[in-house]
Amino acid sequence: MIRKYAFVTICISALAGCGQESSDSDIALPSATFAESYAAAEAALAAAEANRNAWSKTDGILEQSKTAYDEGRTDDAIELANEARLQAELALAQSISQKKEWKANLVLE
């Protein structure tokens, strides 16, 4: 089980580094506003909390996002909101996986 999570973490890290640097000739992709990013993070956190598996630091990151936005650091605020959303989504996936696989990890003697 731990190996699966380690593998997924490694894959996510590897994929994150696969992007190419953009140039002026690249087509600009639309970016989410702070409100959209924050709302998505709140929804993901609510789903994780509903499954009783929200990670302890996610709420703090969401609060840091709000503070950054209030201070006028919009790019930082969006990045933090996206991090909080990702953590909440991973916590939800972990919860669902563990609900399905817990019996396979029992050690019965």
Image: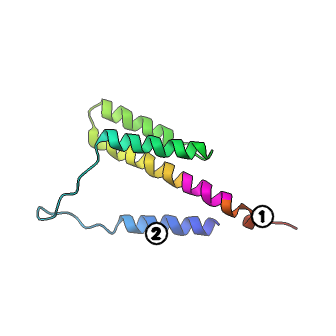
Q: Quadrant of residue 28?
A: bottom left
Where's the N terminus, which quadrant? bottom right
- Please determine whether, in this image, residue 43 is positioned above or below residue 6: above
* Amino acid under disc 2: Cys
* Side (left or right) of 107 relative to 84: right
* Side (left or right) of 103 relative to 95: right
- Please determine whether, in this image, residue 96 is positioned above or below residue 50: below
x, y (%) of residue 51?
Answer: 61, 47
Q: Is residue 96 magenta?
A: yes
Is residue 55 among the parts visible in the rendering? no
Q: What element carries label 2?
A: helix
Mark number for residue 106?
1
x, y (%) of residue 47?
Answer: 53, 45
- Please determine whether, in this image, residue 99 is positioned above or below residue 56: below
Q: Residue furthest left?
A: 25
Is residue 28 among the parts visible in the rendering? yes
- What's the residue at 27%, 37% (across, down)? 73
* Side (left or right) of 88 relative to 64: right
Q: In which quarter of the image is residue 72?
A: top left
- Dot 1 alpha-carbon crowd within 10 angstroms: few under 14, some 14 to 19, many 20 or more: few
Q: What stretch is highlighted in magenta?
A: 92-99
Where's the C terminus, which quadrant? bottom right
Chief secondary structure of the magenta span?
A: helix
- Disc 2 marks which residue? 11
Q: What element carries label 1?
A: loop
Q: Is residue 33 magenta?
A: no
- What's the residue at 34%, 47% (across, down)? 79
